[in-house]
Image (cartoon, rainbow, N blue to C red):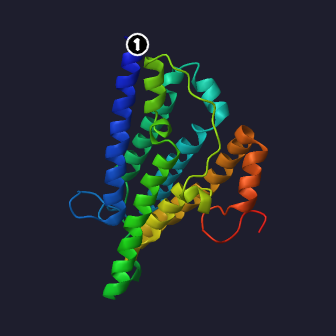
Amino acid sequence: MMRALYLLYATVAYAVFFATFLYLIAFVGNLSFVPVTVDFARVAAPGKAALIDIALIALFGIQHSVMARPSFKARWTHIVPAAIERSTYVLFASLALIILMLFWHQLTAPVWTVTNPLGVAILWALFGLGWLIVLASSFLINHFELFGLQQAWFALREKAAAAPVLRQPLFYKLVRHPLYAGFFLAFWATPAMTAGHLLLAVGLSIYMLIAIRLEERNLVDTFGADYVAYRETTPMLVPGTGGRRA
């Protein structure tokens, strides 16, 4: 019964994540069918709005990075069962993102505006491509393990997870972090960049660069020389720019 409840909990956490992910696309893209977006949000004096938005980005970044560290997980699993540790992380990350979007304050001063129809079309295409790369990259590794469903399913079936294996499917042959590369595209590709959108893009870009460094330390600890060799020959985010050695 408890293992079945774990699976139910993991399914709910995944549903919250996926709904949040879909809303994030609309939020960043200023899509009109949602009530709050990056440029249509709460209003305050520009200085106050910027400070609040920076605090929201920091809250998301700290939660996302701290809870992902192995040292935190080792202590956390004394409280949360291992079968739902990842789902709990996903749920907390989703809640942090919901808080960011719910309390975001708009800063609508224009930074750039592209009016050329071809330029607009290209930027929207890159925006959509970024989100597709994010989703596809998660499936190329193990989407259901990444978001906690596999752990709960294995617990229900009393099945042990296989030892992690370093793989480089498709996008991972081109860059080490295609999922983050997709987010960079999604956050920066817009025909109408405002100060608020720029603040979000810069803040989350800084967070991602820090997260990559922390994540790669863990990957070296897990895969040792294999990951070091992969890192030496494969670029971090931009295809064709060479690995760390270059």
Q: Is residue 109 visible?
A: no
Relative to 160, say whether 144 is above or below.
Answer: below
Residue shown at the point (42%, 36%) measured from the top left: 91
Q: Which quadrant is the C terminus positioned in? A: bottom right
Q: How would you rate the neighbour count of disc 1 (Cα within 10 Å): few for under 14, some for 14-19, many for 20 or more?
A: few
- Give x and y (percent) for residue 128: 37, 65
Relative to 84, say whether 198 is above or below.
Answer: below
- Give x and y (percent) for residue 111: 43, 79
Residue furthest left in the image:
33
Residue furthest bottom in the image:
116
Q: Is residue 55 left or right of residue 124?
A: right
- Give x and y (percent) for residue 84: 47, 25
Residue shown at the point (35%, 47%) measured from the top left: 20
The residue to which callout 1 is attached is 2
Q: Is residue 122 visible?
A: yes
Relative to 114, say whether 108 is above or below.
Answer: above
